[in-house]
Image: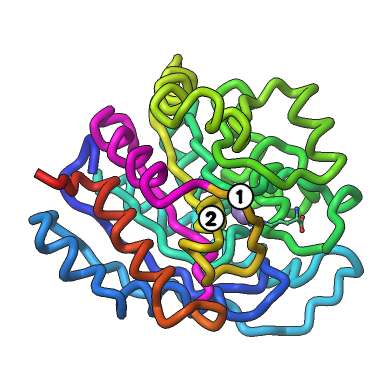
């Protein structure tokens, strides 16, 4: 919680953007892992917005964009809900779901913030297009949509694009890029802190640089946190695991620094997939990470 009082918890039990089933059960797993208890220990006033209604599967059959129509419908509804939360001056905390729901989140935010900074914590860049995507899974395209780069119909969701600016975006934890994404990152100038950069500079310097980029000339900062940014040894419950990720301590430290900055104005945690988890380890980790973002301290 950074600039507002209440945290509005919005569950989005939706997984059609991912290649594997299960992330639609993410919000329930995160609640089961003790989210409400953790927030009450932090004495944070919470408004539970309940789960967003998700569209039924009506067999949308776009050849290269899987569940295209469901994703449009979901994100249209999500954008309206997020916008309403911001209008109430509450802090939107969105629980996914797969990363395609980021489209609806920033579409809702864009109705209030004209120059939104975005921190995209992820093993991936999610900057694919219909043509560059190796999978057709829209969770791999969701950041691109906000830059006007994604599939046309998606960018036409109210607020969805192109409302984000490359110079206001930082990627952190990146370690798997498809060819088209690399090219776009280089040509657009999006700042990308790969695992190599984290190893070389340390998370402390990376976060200092990242915060200075996303706060320069912006009127809000959104954190989009894909749990696959963490090393799969820490976070096995996710659908696209890439080895060599952010450590447990680095992730907490980054989130603690974001809290200290008091600049974050909204957040989402996505890609927790309980059907791939070891017990409920990844969901429990997510609860702890949320706590760090919201001010939990060791002492
Ligand atoms: N949000 C995610 N986990 N994205 C994974 C994307 C993987 C790959 N780049 C693709 O486009 O299919
Ligand atoms: Mn992602
Ligand atoms: Mn990812």
Q: Identify the image quadrant of the C terminus.
A: top left
Label number found at residue 231: 2
Q: Position of residue 107 (x, y in %)?
A: 54, 46
The answer to which of 103 and 34 lies nearer the viewer is 34
Q: Is residue 281 visible?
A: yes
Q: Is 125 left or right of 113, judged from the image as shown?
A: right
Residue depicted at 23% across the width and 47% down the height: 294
Camera-nearest residue between 258 and 46: 258
198 in the magenta segment: no
> Which stretch is magenta?
246-273
Where disc 2 sits, the SS reads: loop
Q: Are marks 2 and 1 in contact (CB under 8 Å)?
A: yes
Residue 71 drawn at (x, y percent):
66, 66
Residue 191 left/right relative to 69: left
Q: Residue at x 85, y 76 (%)?
A: 61
The residue carrying mark 1 is 244
In the foreground, 276 or 90 = 276
Return the residue nearer the eye: 102 or 230. Answer: 230
Q: Is residue 283 left or right of residue 240?
A: left
Mark 2–mark 1 Cα distance, whole angstroms, equals 6 Å
């Amino acid at each position: 919680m950074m600039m507002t009082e209440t945290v509005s918890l919005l569950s989005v039990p939706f997984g059609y953007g991912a290649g594997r089933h299960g992330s639609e059960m993410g919000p329930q797993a995160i609640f089961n892992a003790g989210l409400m208890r953790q927030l009450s220990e932090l004495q944070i006033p919470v408004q539970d917005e309940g789960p967003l209604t998700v569209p039924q599967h009506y067999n949308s059959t776009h050849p290269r964009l899987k569940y295209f129509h469901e994703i449009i419908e979901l994100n249209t509804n999500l954008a309206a809900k997020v916008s309403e939360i911001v209008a109430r001056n509450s802090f939107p905390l969105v629980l996914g779901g797969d990363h395609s729901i980021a489209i609806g989140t920033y579409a809702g935010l864009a109705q209030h913030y004209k120059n939104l900074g975005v921190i995209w914590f992820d093993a991936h860049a999610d900057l694919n297009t219909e043509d560059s995507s190796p999978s057709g899974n829209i969770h791999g395209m969701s950041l691109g949509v906000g830059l006007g780069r994604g599939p046309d119909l998606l960018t036409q969701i109210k607020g969805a694009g192109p409302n984000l600016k490359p110079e206001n975006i930082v990627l952190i934890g990146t370690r798997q890029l498809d060819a088209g994404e690399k090219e776009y990152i280089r040509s657009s100038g999006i700042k990308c802190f790969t695992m190599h950069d984290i190893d070389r500079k340390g998370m402390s310097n990376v976060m200092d640089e990242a915060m200075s980029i996303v706060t320069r000339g912006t009127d809000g900062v959104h954190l989009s946190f894909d749990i696959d940014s963490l090393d799969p040894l820490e976070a096995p419950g996710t659908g696209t695991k890439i080895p060599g990720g952010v450590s447990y301590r680095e992730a907490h430290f980054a989130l603690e620094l974001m809290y200290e900055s008091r600049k974050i104005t909204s957040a989402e945690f996505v890609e927790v997939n309980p059907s791939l988890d070891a017990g409920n380890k990844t969901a429990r980790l997510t609860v702890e990470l949320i706590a760090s973002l919201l001010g939990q301290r060791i002492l």
